[in-house]
Image (cartoon, rainbow, N blue to C red):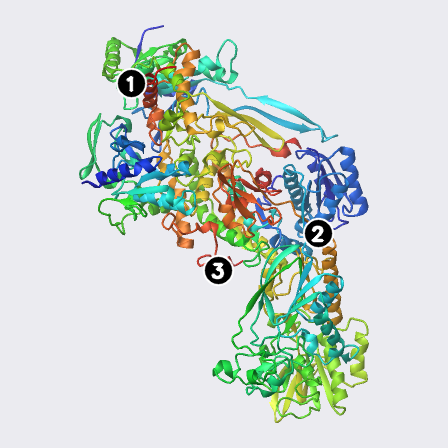
């Protein structure tokens, strides 16, 4: 076998702390290495060309590229060796950037280490064999998880692209956080006026199946062919009959249910439709408050319902769907403001979250759009906005910036002036983050046209004084203490990953960071992909975003799905397990341990033997370790390959 | 051949010390609960109480012998080219094996007919054979698994030995069997036998008389061929065999080997290691076909080779020295004597066609 | 009627439906028994029972896969049968189990330490308070506690765990008896790592790589396809080095983890008496501590290494 | 290449591709400085890591072996690390009886986002191995005959 080794400078990224020329020279002495050189940028066009030329001129049949992580450029170089006429799996990479040059300054040690990594790559490559992927059919249906604006956008774009969409929404209506907003920055146009039509499009679109008040129970399979189980939670209302007339809401004797849509400002009937524009507009019974369930008798709604839709005996229902791709758009939840004891959030009625304030501003809100403070319904004259409550604060393990708070606070200050002309707003802030089209102009208007007083400093504490709330903080620009006697305090609660995100990530087999946000496969170059083929991300599930960014990601994810589905067939990674029938003694242990059911026992000339189902095998290699006689081997990660790497490393 | 000598118990260790200065000396020593032939160590005791667990064949036929080393030297101008350097490793130096029993020494005379013929001479075996001398201890009685006299040997057989020591009062009578042997006896630690030869002779004949009558194995070669295709017989005989290599690896007359290259990077070595016909791999063909798929086939070969096929081509010499290790050390007590006798019985029982 | 005769009767009745029944008979001398394969009624007469029945009859079962066979078992043998059934290597309906209460078996290596040559014992009497041997150097009388196999000294399974036919009074396990296994492990682990490694090197030095330890193991079902002797995968070289020999012991021990029924055949079978059982015993100890699991007790269980718990009871994630 | 005398010890790491290998990448991207002893062997999943690879590595004379996979519940292949956890824990328990200091082998979980944690793991483990010093394996086993003479390996041809 003739192997070519290409050691990349990556400009100065590698060359800076690794003597790439020396590594190439050393590689010359490795078994089977017929050619070695160092290249400036192996991933650049000239870089790839030099590889291709060397393969052709030197008649190489395998290539080792020592450069960045294979998680970055393995596909790039596989394509390159393929263009050179080799099988794309006759490539190995040595990660001498992320794992060497970037983590140490000792040039001698780094060079030495880099040579070692090249050595094991060569030893592995010597035992590689050409592989050809199997192709398989695609189920051209996508599941979008989450009916917020990002999910809605993804669903509509996919559906308009001509593929069937299954949209799963946890609550009884789509719309997400945006549907709770009154106006949107920086244009101050009505949130529901721009979101509403999209929501309607969703239910009316022939290609979209909507499961509201439902959650993903289980997902199995692989890109192109997932099987999902969706749990439709019991609403105790037969939605096929419910017309959303709302009669039951009026007649319901129990009005003490939590009003989730209004962020807990006020209460709701035990049978409820969250808001007038809800999609679907169907009632749901809150069994925790419904007398029929608590006392076992009532049945008012059942009596009044003109369509006889009420069904107290309803149970959760599991529906199964076959899909080919997933878009996770599960959004965010608000930071729990009560964690800041000194602010009194949750204890003081007039210390509320920004989203609650949105409901107070909203014409469809509990106060009909008139700003009344929760404690006594009085109209507040002095409103204090506190920024970064649960953002950029290590002490509550929320070091990140939630991104959109600065903007909506400016918006809320403006709206406050609109609603109450003789009011005065104060904004306690750390920095103003307004990077975006017309954003900074917008915050300026809040200050200059609407006279909101921006105070640069953190609020130390809030305490009651009479019917006022004293907000004490520092004005770091003036270098003075500052106290404001407020009628209402609005805390800009930060964003955090939606409740249940990690659990969903585990079902989807994607990674999530320590805060529960889903991990994209590359922070810059693959922002909506994940490391699990066929699973994409949109909106705040991946990290805090404002509406335009979320909508943009929704469309981006849709584009990825459409791209995936535009292929005739998909190719399965051929790096999967193979059974050596003569060695297999048919003990079936591999069958027990395979997480994918990719191994089944067959009868081979009267003997039980294991067989791998190629399209189902994901290439984890659990079976290879399970098999005591090494009859199951994972292609490109065979025992002999790993043993050879170990051997190479143990020579010294 | 010069006259017999007397080696007193007191002179034994000094003599061994002396031998150790001239030769690589191996002696039976207790390791754990086994007795093995180990390099002589003046500080450590010998164990001559019984025949060693492992036969004294290693010195002439090591369990693993490095035949040669090789390495590739790359052409700096064109690393695609590499020069190969070979280093054959022919064994050097002389070895003396002390304290084996007649059966053990007789064992590798079986090898000679295979490795040292007119046509073919195995240089490695040849070199070791020539440079190795055996100082053997005659047996004064026999154990439950001994059957040297069945196969044409005896407790005082000198075949393969260079010196035979016969225990007598106060020491041993030492008789040189070969030139090599008489050289070993040229030592100040050796006294004149001084009439002790008779005592030695008496001891030998006493051991011979003590033997139970040996069955006639004459019909064995033909019988084993007769039952060759009698699979039921062999399935029955091999039922308890677990196909391990204990019998063959401990057999003084088993000489099969396997050759493998072990390579590290650009360097490699070619190894010759004991192989054993009880193993499935022994006859495994590259195609995956195995002409001896079951332990019945394999056991048949072991017994057949020793008592039929080998004698057929080597003037009736049975390729077994009757040491009984294969019986004593078999994890499940397979008894080759039973099998041979059973085959004779079976063959005579059913008419030859 | 003696329990043995009862069993013999049962075997004769069952024989017609079976390929054979595996038991023990007298071997080449009074001290050595040997496995017996009963096919004809008259074979059954040769069946013996007693402290010389050291061989684990279950070792042969996987060789009869697909055939119906009978097997006479000691308590410890029955554990191996259970484990084989559990791993679907033997079908329960394919094996008829004949059990007798077992008081223990002798460890011939221990006996050997009391006589010059195990191969020169001319008579044995194991009926009495001691084990009586007739040897060239005269009568020997050995205390049972000095010659019982280790496993018998701490045996909790004197009677077949599962059986189709059982004869005789079940023997109750002696609790709180000596546990030589634990003692040996403790003694070994008391050494400094390097010394212990040297101990193994010294012991493995005399290994002849005959694989009797593997082939006598009832749970080693790979047999002809063991990774110790293949080039692909190439786990082991042919070098005659203690490293390769010790590596094989670790392969065996690792593959047995959670499956080993501690019958001790590996060590008993070793022709050069290398004390290799300790490695398997340690694995069993670890398995017991981690998963409170013992192999060969429950035919329904799954070996701990072929399953998992999302929250492990006794594995605390390493705090780094 | 030969271990840098006096400076480095030989530490071999087996990392799953999806989490820990990515975590090591993230550490690199973040320029989180680490000791240079570690050599990483990339495997698809911690469930692919045969405990015997580790035994082989340690008997081969490596001074330490580090295994890292996805956090429990976070395995790209759903349950690979659950099997790995059991296998590796058993192995760790068995090392003492064969005369290998169990401190020479550790396994842990590092996710693709935990660059800093990876730096911490590598640093801590490397310190631990340097505290234990060079492995005695080669000296002890090398003292016995039979092993084909230790080769200079490829460097012999250099």
Q: Which residue is mark 2?
A: A72
Rendering quarter of residue A360: bottom right
Which residue matches tag 1? Answer: B139
Quadrant of image for the N terminus of chain C: top left
Marks 3 and 2: same chain? no
Label 3, label 2: how many angstroms apart (C-alpha)? 34 Å
| Residue at image coords 44%, 31% | C209
Q: Nearer the viewer, residue A227 or D137?
A: A227
Label 3: how many Cα within 10 Å (few below 14, some 14–19, many 20+): few
Q: Dot 1 lies on which element?
A: loop
Q: CA distance from mark 2 to mark 1?
A: 76 Å
Percent x, y of residue A430: 70, 76
Looking at the image, residue A173 sits to the left or right of residue B250; the answer is right
Secondary structure, mark 2, is helix
In this view, the residue farthest toward the top is B1
Q: How many marks?
A: 3
Quadrant location of residue B101?
Answer: top left
């Amino acid at each position: 076998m003739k192997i070519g080794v290409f050691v990349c400078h990556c400009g100065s990224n590698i060359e800076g702390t690794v003597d790439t020329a020396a590594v190439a020279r050393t590689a010359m002495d490795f078994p089977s290495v017929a050619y070695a050189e160092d290249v400036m940028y192996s991933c650049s066009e000239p870089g790839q060309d030099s590889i291709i030329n060397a393969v052709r001129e030197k008649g190489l049949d395998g290539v080792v590229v020592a450069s960045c992580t294979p998680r970055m450029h393995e596909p790039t170089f596989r394509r390159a060796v393929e263009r050179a006429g080799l099988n794309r799996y006759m490539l190995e990479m040595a990660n001498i950037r992320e794992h060497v040059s970037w983590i140490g300054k000792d040039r001698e040690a780094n060079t030495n280490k880099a040579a070692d990594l090249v050595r094991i790559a060569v030893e592995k490559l010597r035992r590689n064999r050409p592989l050809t992927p199997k192709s398989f059919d695609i189920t051209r249906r996508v599941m979008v998880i989450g009916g917020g604006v990002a999910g809605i956008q993804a669903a509509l774009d996919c559906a308009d692209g001509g593929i069937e969409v299954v949209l799963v929404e946890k609550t009884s209506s789509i719309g997400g956080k945006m549907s709770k907003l009154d106006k949107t920055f920086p244009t101050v146009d009505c949130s529901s006026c721009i979101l509403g039509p999209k929501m309607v499009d969703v239910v009316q679109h022939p290609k979209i199946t909507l499961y509201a008040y439902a959650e993903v129970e289980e997902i199995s399979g692989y890109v192109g062919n997932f099987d999902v189980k969706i749990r439709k939670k019991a609403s105790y209302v037969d939605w096929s009959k419910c017309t959303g007339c709302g009669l039951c809401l009026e007649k319901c004797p129990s009005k003490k249910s939590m009003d989730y849509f209004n962020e807990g400002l006020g209460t709701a009937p035990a049978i409820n439709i969250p808001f007038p524009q809800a999609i679907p507009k169907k009632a749901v019974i809150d069994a925790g408050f419904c007398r029929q369930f608590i006392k076992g008798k009532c049945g008012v709604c059942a009596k009044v319902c003109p369509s006889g839709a009420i069904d107290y005996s309803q149970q959760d229902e599991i529906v199964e769907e076959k899909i080919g791709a997933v878009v996770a758009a599960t959004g965010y939840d608000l930071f729990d403001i009560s964690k800041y004891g000194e602010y009194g959030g949750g204890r003081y009625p007039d210390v509320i979250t920004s989203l609650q304030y949105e409901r107070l501003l909203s014409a469809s809100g509990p106060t009909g759009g008139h700003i009344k403070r929760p404690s006594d319904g009085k109209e507040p004259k002095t409103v204090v906005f506190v920024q970064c409550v649960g953002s950029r604060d290590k002490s509550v393990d929320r070091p990140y910036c939630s991104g959109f708070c600065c903007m909506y606070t400016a918006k809320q200050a403006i709206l406050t002036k609109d609603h109450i002309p003789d009011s005065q707003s104060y904004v306690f802030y750390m920095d103003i983050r307004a990077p975006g089209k017309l954003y900074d102009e917008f915050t300026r208007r809040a200050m200059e046209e609407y006279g909101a007083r921006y105070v640069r400093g953190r609020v130390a504490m809030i305490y009651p004084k009479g019917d006022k709330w004293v907000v004490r903080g520092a004005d770091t620009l003036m270098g003075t203490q500052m106290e404001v006697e407020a009628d209402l305090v609005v805390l800009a609660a930060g964003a955090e990953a939606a409740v249940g995100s990690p659990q969903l990530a585990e079902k989807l087999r994607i990674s999530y960071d320590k805060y529960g946000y889903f991990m994209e496969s590359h922070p810059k170059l693959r922002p909506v992909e994940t490391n699990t083929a066929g699973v994409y991300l949109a909106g705040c599930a991946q990290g805090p975003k404002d509406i335009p960014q979320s909508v943009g990601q929704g469309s981006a994810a849709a584009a990825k799905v459409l791209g995936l589905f535009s292929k005739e067939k998909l190719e399965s990674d051929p790096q999967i397990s193979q059974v050596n029938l003569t060695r297999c003694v048919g003990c079936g242990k591999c069958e027990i341990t395979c997480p994918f059911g990719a191994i089944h026992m067959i009868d081979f000339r009267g003997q039980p033997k294991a067989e791998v189902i190629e399209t189902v095998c994901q290439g984890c290699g659990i079976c290879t370790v399970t098999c005591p006689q090494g009859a199951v081997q994972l292609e490109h990660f065979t025992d002999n390959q790993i043993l050879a790497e170990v051997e190479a490393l143990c020579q010294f | 051949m010069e006259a017999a000598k007397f080696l007193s118990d007191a002179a034994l260790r000094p003599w061994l010390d002396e031998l150790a200065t001239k030769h690589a000396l191996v002696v039976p020593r207790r390791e754990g609960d086994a007795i093995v032939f180990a390099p002589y160590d003046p500080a450590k005791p010998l164990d001559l109480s019984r025949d060693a667990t492992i036969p004294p064949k290693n010195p002439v036929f090591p369990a693993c012998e490095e035949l040669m080393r090789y390495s590739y030297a790359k052409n700096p101008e064109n690393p695609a080219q590499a020069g190969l350097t070979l280093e054959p490793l022919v064994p050097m130096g002389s070895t003396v094996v002390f304290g084996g029993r007649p059966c053990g020494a007789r064992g590798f005379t079986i090898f000679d007919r295979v490795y040292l013929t007119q046509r073919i001479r195995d240089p490695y075996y040849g070199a070791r054979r020539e440079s190795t001398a055996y100082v053997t201890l005659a047996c004064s009685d026999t154990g439950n698994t001994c059957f040297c006299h069945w196969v044409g040997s005896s407790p005082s057989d000198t075949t393969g030995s260079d010196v035979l020591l016969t225990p007598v009062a106060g020491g041993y009578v030492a008789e040189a069997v070969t030139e090599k042997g008489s050289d070993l006896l040229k030592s100040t630690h050796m006294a004149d036998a001084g009439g002790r030869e008779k005592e030695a002779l008496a001891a030998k004949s006493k051991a011979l008389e003590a033997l139970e009558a040996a069955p006639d194995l004459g019909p064995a070669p033909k019988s084993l061929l007769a039952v060759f295709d009698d699979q039921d017989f062999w399935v029955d005989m091999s039922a308890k065999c677990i196909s391990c290599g204990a019998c063959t690896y401990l057999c003084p007359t088993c000489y099969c080997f396997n050759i493998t290259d072990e390579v590290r990077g650009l360097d490699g070595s070619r190894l010759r290691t004991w192989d054993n016909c009880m193993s499935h791999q022994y006859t495994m063909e590259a195609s995956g076909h195995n002409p001896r798929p079951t332990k019945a086939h394999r056991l048949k070969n072991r017994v057949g080779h020793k008592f039929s096929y080998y004698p057929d081509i080597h003037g009736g010499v049975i390729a077994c020295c009757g040491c009984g290790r294969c019986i004593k050390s078999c994890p499940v007590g397979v008894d080759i004597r039973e099998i041979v006798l059973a085959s004779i019985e079976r063959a005579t029982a059913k008419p030859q066609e | 009627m003696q329990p043995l005769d009862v069993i013999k009767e049962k075997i004769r009745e069952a024989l017609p439906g079976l390929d054979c029944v595996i038991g023990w008979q007298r071997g080449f001398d009074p001290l050595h028994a040997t496995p017996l394969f009963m096919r004809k009624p008259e074979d059954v007469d040769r069946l013996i029972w007693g402290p010389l029945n050291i061989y684990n009859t279950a070792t042969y079962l996987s060789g009869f896969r697909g055939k119906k066979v009978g097997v006479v078992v000691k308590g410890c043998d029955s554990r191996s049968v259970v484990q084989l059934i559990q791993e679907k290597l033997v079908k329960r309906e394919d094996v008829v189990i004949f059990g007798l209460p077992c008081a223990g078996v002798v460890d011939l290596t221990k006996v050997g330490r009391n006589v010059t040559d195990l191969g020169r014992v001319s008579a044995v009497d194991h009926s009495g308070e001691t084990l009586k041997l007739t040897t060239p150097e005269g009568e020997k009388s050995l205390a049972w506690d000095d010659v019982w196999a280790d496993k018998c000294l701490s045996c909790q399974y004197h009677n077949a765990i599962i059986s189709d036919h059982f004869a005789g009074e079940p023997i109750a396990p002696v609790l709180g008896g000596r546990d030589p296994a634990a003692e040996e492990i403790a003694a070994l682990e008391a050494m400094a790592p390097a010394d212990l490694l040297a101990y193994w090197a010294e012991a493995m030095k005399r290994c002849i790589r005959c694989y009797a330890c593997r082939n006598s193991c009832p749970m080693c079902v790979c047999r002809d396809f063991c990774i110790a002797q293949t080039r692909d995968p190439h786990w082991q070289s042919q070098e005659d080095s203690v490293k390769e020999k010790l590596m094989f012991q670790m392969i065996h021990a690792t593959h047995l983890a959670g499956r080993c029924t501690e019958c001790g055949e590996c060590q008993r079978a070793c022709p050069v008496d290398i004390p290799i059982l300790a490695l398997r015993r340690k694995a069993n100890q670890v398995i017991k501590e981690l998963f409170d699991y013992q192999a060969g007790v429950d035919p329904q269980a799954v070996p701990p290494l072929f399953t998992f718990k999302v929250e492990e009871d006794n594995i605390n994630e390493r705090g780094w | 290449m030969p271990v840098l005398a006096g400076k480095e010890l030989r530490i071999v790491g087996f990392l799953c591709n999806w989490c820990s290998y990515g975590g090591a990448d993230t550490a690199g991207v973040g320029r989180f400085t680490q000791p240079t002893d570690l050599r990483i062997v990339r495997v698809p999943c911690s469930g692919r890591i045969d405990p015997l690879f580790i035994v082989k590595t340690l008997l081969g004379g490596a001074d330490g072996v580090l295994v890292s996979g996805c956090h429990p519940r976070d395995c790209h292949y759903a349950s690979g690390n659950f099997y790995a956890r059991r296998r590796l824990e058993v192995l760790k328990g068995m090392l003492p009886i064969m005369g290998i200091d169990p401190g020479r082998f550790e396994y842990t979980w590092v996710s693709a986002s935990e660059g800093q944690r990876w730096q911490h793991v590598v640093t801590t483990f490397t310190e631990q191995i340097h505290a234990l010093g060079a492995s005695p394996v080669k000296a002890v086993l090398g003292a016995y005959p039979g092993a084909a003479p230790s080769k200079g390996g490829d460097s012999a041809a250099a």
